[in-house]
Image (cartoon, grey):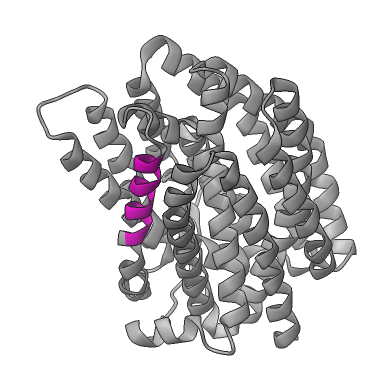
């Protein structure tokens, strides 16, 4: 249950970033953190792919274990941020990401620690980030956004992310090619740590997570939340293909050239950048559910196109089409998700935690399915699987209809 807003500090200087407002201040935290995470971005799966001697199955298993061990901690973390507040929880989560970058920096330096011990510590850091940061972040985002301009605000926010995404893959590729992965991990560590600064100026809010552990699991599949849960599972499942399998596919296609992977990634983002604001405006003018319903079919075709290409021209064309369709789907999808969270009233934290749990379940299930699929067939079949599950995002529209 939410409590009234209160300032993190009793007073601020008139030029302090706190005067930007709650939403821009919180968004600045995420945008700085986004720079750090996107410095690794497409290159973390590639790093693991090289670490495991070009075994896609081991990379998929690593991510499956990583997401699986997070699942039991969402509810305890929710109980924790109910006591300490959302801002402090986000700070803990951010320090978890700093820990991850730190141990992977050591992993690339070939120190005496067993690499699997360092990886386990890194997974612990990622667990802190996933369970302590993201639910509080989405709770505050849902509360701080203007209900009438949610699509425009998200469009502007994602456009800024896209602008940053043009530079970061190229910068990361340059660092890796000239100084190795350790330079990239170190850059991510510093930038992620700096992202804590805006959190000192975010208004502190208290929530009370009211579901017990077993009750949370039951609620996931209850009649009330089932459509939302399945939609988020589908989103998590297809997202894992985009974030893990696609970078390895590009790396294999370009025969190990980091600069080409970074260059193609940046070029695709440039093309799709202008579309972000347009879709954000249309989300406010049109029904988000309508855009999601038809956009998911176009988005699924984009995954099919990615599954059949094998040349640079084909990859560029398929990626551009898929990037456009992704914007058409994900901007209204996120707007609808935040709207539903805000409409949940004092159950906003429960809704958000269940959403994060559903995303995690979808990722784990997809990763475990991809191991035998990509072992028995080619990597392209992962994109066909993503096309099928992406249609499941339409369940969110059904959930919205039930709540309306």
Asked if residue 253 is among those painted magenta in the image, a careful observer would answer no
Q: Relative to 390, does residue 117 appear above or below in the rendering?
A: above
Residue 1 seen in this snapshot = no
Q: Between residues 377 and 29, which one lies in front from this camera angle?
A: 377
Q: Relative to 25, does residue 231 appear above or below in the rendering?
A: below
Q: Quadrant of residue 180?
A: top left
| Residue shown at the point (14%, 25%) measured from the top left | 111
Question: Where, quadrant-wise, is the C terminus in this rendering?
Answer: bottom right
- Rendering coords of residue 202 (x, y %): 50, 57
- Rendering coords of residue 317 (x, y %): 78, 30
Left or right, 212 with respect to 345, comes to left
- Rendering coords of residue 104 (x, y %): 28, 33
Residue 29 seen in this snapshot = yes
| Residue shown at the point (74%, 45%) measured from the top left | 302
Q: Which residues are magenta?
A: 57-68
Q: Relative to 312, does residue 22 appear above or below in the rendering?
A: below
| Residue shown at the point (36%, 66%) measured from the top left | 71
Q: Between residues 52 and 265, which one lies in front from this camera angle?
A: 52
| Residue shown at the point (83%, 51%) measured from the top left | 279
Q: Quadrant of residue 361?
A: bottom left
Q: Main secondary structure of the magenta part?
A: helix
Left or right, 356 with respect to 121, comes to right
Q: Relative to 132, does residue 167 appear above or below in the rendering?
A: above
How many numbered marks have been drawn onto this rendered protein structure? 0
- Rendering coords of residue 308 (x, y %): 70, 37
């Amino acid at each position: 249950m939410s409590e009234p807003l209160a300032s993190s500090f009793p007073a601020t200087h008139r030029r302090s970033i706190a005067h930007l407002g709650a939403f821009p201040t919180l968004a600045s935290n995420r945008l700085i953190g986004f720079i750090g995470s996107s410095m690794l971005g497409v290159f973390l799966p590639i790093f693991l792919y090289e670490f495991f001697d070009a075994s896609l199955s081991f990379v998929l298993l690593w991510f499956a274990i990583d997401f699986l061990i997070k699942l039991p901690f969402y509810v305890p973390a929710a109980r924790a941020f109910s006591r300490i507040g959302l801002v402090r929880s986000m700070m803990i989560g951010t320090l978890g990401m700093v820990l991850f970058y730190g141990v992977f920096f050591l992993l690339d330096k070939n120190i005496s620690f067993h690499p699997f011990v360092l990886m386990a510590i890194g997974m612990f850091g990622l667990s802190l980030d996933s369970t302590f940061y993201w639910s509080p972040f989405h709770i505050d985002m849902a509360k701080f956004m203007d209900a009438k301009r949610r699509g425009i605000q998200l469009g502007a926010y994602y456009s800024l992310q896209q602008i940053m995404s043009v530079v970061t893959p190229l910068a990361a590729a340059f660092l890796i090619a000239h100084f190795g992965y350790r330079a990239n991990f170190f850059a991510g560590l510093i930038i992620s740590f700096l992202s804590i600064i805006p959190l000192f100026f975010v208004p502190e809010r208290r929530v009370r997570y009211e579901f017990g552990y077993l009750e949370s699991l039951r609620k996931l599949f209850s009649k009330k939340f089932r459509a939302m849960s399945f939609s988020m599972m589908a989103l998590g499942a297809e997202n894992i293909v985009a974030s893990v399998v696609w970078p390895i596919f590009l790396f294999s296609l370009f025969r190990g050239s980091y600069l080409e992977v970074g260059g193609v990634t940046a070029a695709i983002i440039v093309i799709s950048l202008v579309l972000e604001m347009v879709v954000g405006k249309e989300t406010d003018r049109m029904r988000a559910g309508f855009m999601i319903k038809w956009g998911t079919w176009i988005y699924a075709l984009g995954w099919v196109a990615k599954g059949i290409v094998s040349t640079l021209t084909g990859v560029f064309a398929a990626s551009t089409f898929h990037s456009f369709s992704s914007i058409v789907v994900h901007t209204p999808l996120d707007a609808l998700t935040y709207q539903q969270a805000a409409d949940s009233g004092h159950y906003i934290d429960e809704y958000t935690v269940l959403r994060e749990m559903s995303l995690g379940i979808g990722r784990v299930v997809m990763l475990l399915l991809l191991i035998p699929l990509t072992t028995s067939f080619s990597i392209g079949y992962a994109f066909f699987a993503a096309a099928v599950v992406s249609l499941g995002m339409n369940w969110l529209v059904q959930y919205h209809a039930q709540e309306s």
